[in-house]
């Protein structure tokens, strides 16, 4: 019995399952959790889905999104005999949990930096999205996919590949997308909601953010800053900064882009690379994690201090990448 079969066996025995998704939820975490929840409900299993943050408004087209409950205290969580962490590389991504969940803990993720924090760790770094893993799990289980489930899985894969633009796009992710479209998913419907349903405030915030643009390393590194004051001025929230880091990354010659977003407790740093620099290594050294081309971390300091701390690390990595290329 392989890990997929073991997980299916455990899920089949449970009367209910508690699902957790990481703070600042993205399309992969949301779509994967909702699809798995619907599959479990189809097998007469009760489910709860919890997240530290609310569902971003541009993901509220996802079927049953309102079932995701925002929690800030573990005391508000109802635990079933099985807990499943979705798209969460470590427990730090689930700040409402003071400790490891009780009962059997299943960890389903695709981040290379995953800490294997579960009893059963279905971690596949080669997967473009956690949605791919959920797709395979449900197929192995033999459960039919409804259109709602397919829409959630398509959104998971579509968003984590940047609309099939990022380096993690594979023949398999394209194949899964094709199969989900054949089930009735509308690529136009998903793309319109994800990328063309932003608020005017977000556009204003983007303008303010781009005005902070700084380049270094002869144009190989670029970064921008978002402060709480900027979000207050534009009546926006953290979810409105999703994808902002890709604007400095889109500049010709830039190899690494950074977004420093001020939070209530410090700064969230998003790192993106075009391939030569492994930003997951940098993020991990700062207590975060992610993928070679996309990673992040949270720092307890000011934005100025965060820039002073992170930028030299990236500049050093860029210098090393140049030396290794020249040698």
Image (spheres, rainbow, N blue to C red):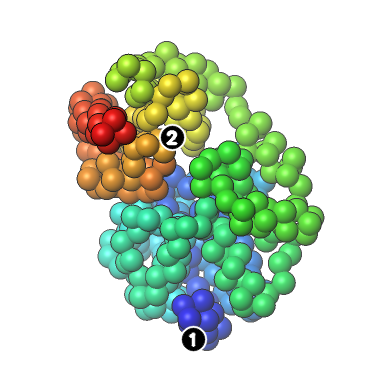
Image disc number at residue 1: 1
Q: Looking at the picture, does residue 135 appear above or below residue 157?
A: below
Q: Going 61% across and 46% down the picture, which residue do you hit?
A: 158
Q: So how many labels did they put on this image?
A: 2
Residue 307 visible in the shown view = yes
Quarter occupied by residue 318:
top left
Residue lying at the far front in this picture: please name it: 327
Camera-side mark, 2 or 1: 2
Say which of 78 and 300 sits in front.
Answer: 300
Q: Going 62% across and 53% down the picture, which residue do you hit?
A: 171
Say which of 98 and 160 sits in front.
Answer: 160
Q: Looking at the picture, does residue 41 appear above or below residue 182?
A: below
Q: Looking at the picture, does residue 118 appear above or below residue 87?
A: below
The quadrant the C terminus occupies is: top left
Q: Going 53% across and 40% down the picture, which residue do you hit?
A: 166
Disc 2 + disc 1, Cβ < 8 Å = no
Tell me residue 308's x, y (percent).
20, 26
Give how far apart the Cα atoms at labels 2 and 1 are: 39 Å
Image disc number at residue 55: none
Quarter occupied by residue 100:
bottom left
Secondary structure under the numbered disc 2 in the rendered image: loop
Q: Going 70% across and 36% down the picture, which residue do you hit?
A: 192
Tell me residue 134's x, y (percent).
56, 65
The answer to which of marks 2 and 1 sits earlier in the sequence is 1
Residue 306 visible in the shown view = no
Tell me residue 58's x, y (percent).
60, 39
Q: Which residue is mark 2?
A: 274
């Amino acid at each position: 019995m392989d890990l997929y079969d073991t997980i299916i066996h455990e899920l089949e025995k449970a009367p209910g399952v508690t699902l957790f998704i990481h703070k600042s939820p993205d399309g992969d975490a949301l779509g994967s959790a909702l699809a798995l929840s619907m599959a479990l409900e189809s097998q007469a299993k009760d489910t709860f889905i919890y997240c530290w943050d609310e569902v971003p408004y541009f993901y509220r087209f996802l079927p049953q999104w309102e079932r995701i409950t925002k929690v800030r205290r573990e005391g508000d969580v109802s635990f079933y005999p099985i807990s499943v962490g979705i798209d969460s590389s470590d427990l730090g991504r689930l700040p409402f949990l003071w400790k490891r969940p009780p009962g059997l803990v299943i960890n389903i993720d695709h981040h290379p930096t995953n800490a294997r924090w579960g009893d059963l760790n279905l971690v596949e770094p080669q997967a473009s999205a956690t949605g791919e893993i959920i797709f395979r799990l449900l197929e192995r289980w033999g459960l039919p996919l409804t259109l709602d489930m397919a829409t959630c899985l398509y959104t998971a894969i579509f968003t984590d590949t940047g609309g099939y633009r990022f380096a993690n796009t594979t023949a398999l992710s394209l194949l899964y997308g094709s199969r989900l479209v054949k089930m009735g998913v509308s690529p136009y419907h998903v793309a319109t909601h994800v990328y063309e349903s932003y608020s005017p405030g977000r556009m204003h915030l983007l303008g303010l953010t781009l005005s902070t643009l700084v380049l270094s390393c002869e144009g190989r590194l670029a970064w921008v800053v978002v402060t709480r004051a900027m979000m207050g001025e534009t009546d926006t929230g953290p979810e409105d900064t999703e994808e902002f880091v890709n604007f400095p990354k889109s500049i010709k010659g830039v190899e690494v882009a950074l977004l420093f977003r001020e939070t209530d407790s410090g700064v969230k740093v998003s790192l993106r690379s075009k391939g030569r620099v492994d930003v997951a290594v940098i993020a991990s050294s700062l207590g975060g994690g992610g993928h070679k081309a996309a990673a992040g971390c949270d720092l307890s300091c000011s934005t100025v201090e965060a820039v002073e701390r992170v930028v030299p690390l990236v500049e050093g990595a860029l210098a090393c990448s140049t030396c290794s290329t020249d040698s």
